Image: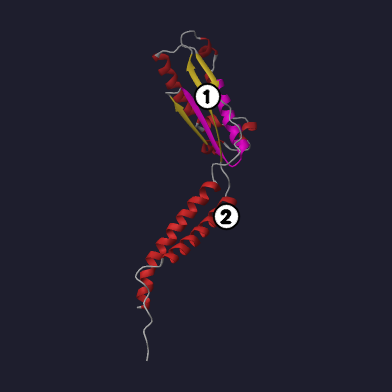
Amino acid sequence: MKTDSPSPPAQPPLRLYLVGGAAAAVVAAVIALIVALVATPVYRASTDVSIRPRIADLGAAEASARLIRNYAAWVDSEAYAARLPESDRGGLSDGEIVRNVRTNGDGDRLVVTIQSEDSNAARAAATVNGLAALLVADVATPERLNDRVRGLEVAVIDAARAPGAPVWPRAEVALPIAAVLGAVLGVAAIWLVWPLTRMSRG
């Protein structure tokens, strides 16, 4: 006499969730580790150029803010990148420098922030420092520095240094995130597939 096999329970057992989620988390973490090891690292270097009026008043501050915004837009251009000496560009073309560099003019803090992201840490710092030196030379003209009423104080706040660690990929961030996402997807897959298993056995 043929007997029917017992049908699976309506819900997956807790052990299946635990094992499946853990296995998916391990697989995802391994994939993230491989990507972190083989991916090209990206390093970020930045510096600030301060452009402040010698005499603090509203009119001078507004003029400095306009100057900062104008120069920030100019530093982002290929025309400005073309002026960078070979010793600071490290073989990069003008277009590559523009793609790597981001410049922001902060009219409230009265600083121009120059940032570069590059696969070469030393080159990222050299590019930023070279552009900052050009900016200081452009802004710090004798007329702007020596004017007793509208004179400016121009200086690099902190020269960029070659970063010791990349901003991407970061294994210490990628691995936990990948493990959590893998576990969630593993549990979700079990929850979705389990009803189909019951139907096939029913």
Amino acid beneath label 1 = Val
| Residue for badge 1 | 49
Q: Position of residue 27 (x, y in %)?
A: 52, 60
Q: Which residue is farthest top?
A: 148
Kindly report which numbered mark, 1 or 2, lies closer to the viewer in this rendering: 2
What SS does tag 1 mark? strand
Mark 1 and mark 2 lie on one chain; the one further toward the N terminus is 2
Pick the front one: 46 or 148: 46
Does residue 24 appear left or right of residue 6 in this picture?
Answer: right
Q: Position of residue 153 (x, y in %)?
A: 52, 16
Estimate how packed mark 1 is, as few (under 14), some (14 to 19) or many (20 or more) residues with alpha carbons within 10 Å.
many
Q: Residue at x 57, y 42 (%)?
A: 166
Say above or below: 11 vs 167: below
Residues shaded magenta: 110-137
Estimate how packed mark 2 is, as few (under 14), some (14 to 19) or many (20 or more) residues with alpha carbons within 10 Å.
few
- Label annotation for residue 34: 2
Q: Residue at x 48, y 51 (%)?
A: 177
Q: Position of residue 156 (x, y in %)?
A: 55, 23
Q: Is residue 112 magenta?
A: yes
Amino acid beneath label 2 = Ile
- Label annotation for residue 87: none
In which image quadrant can residue 167 be found? top right
Quarter of the image for the N terminus: give it.
Answer: bottom left
Give the main secondary structure, helix, strand or loop, of the magenta stretch.
helix
Pick the front one: 161 or 74: 161
Say above or below: 147 vs 113: above
Q: CA distance from mark 1 to mark 2?
A: 39 Å
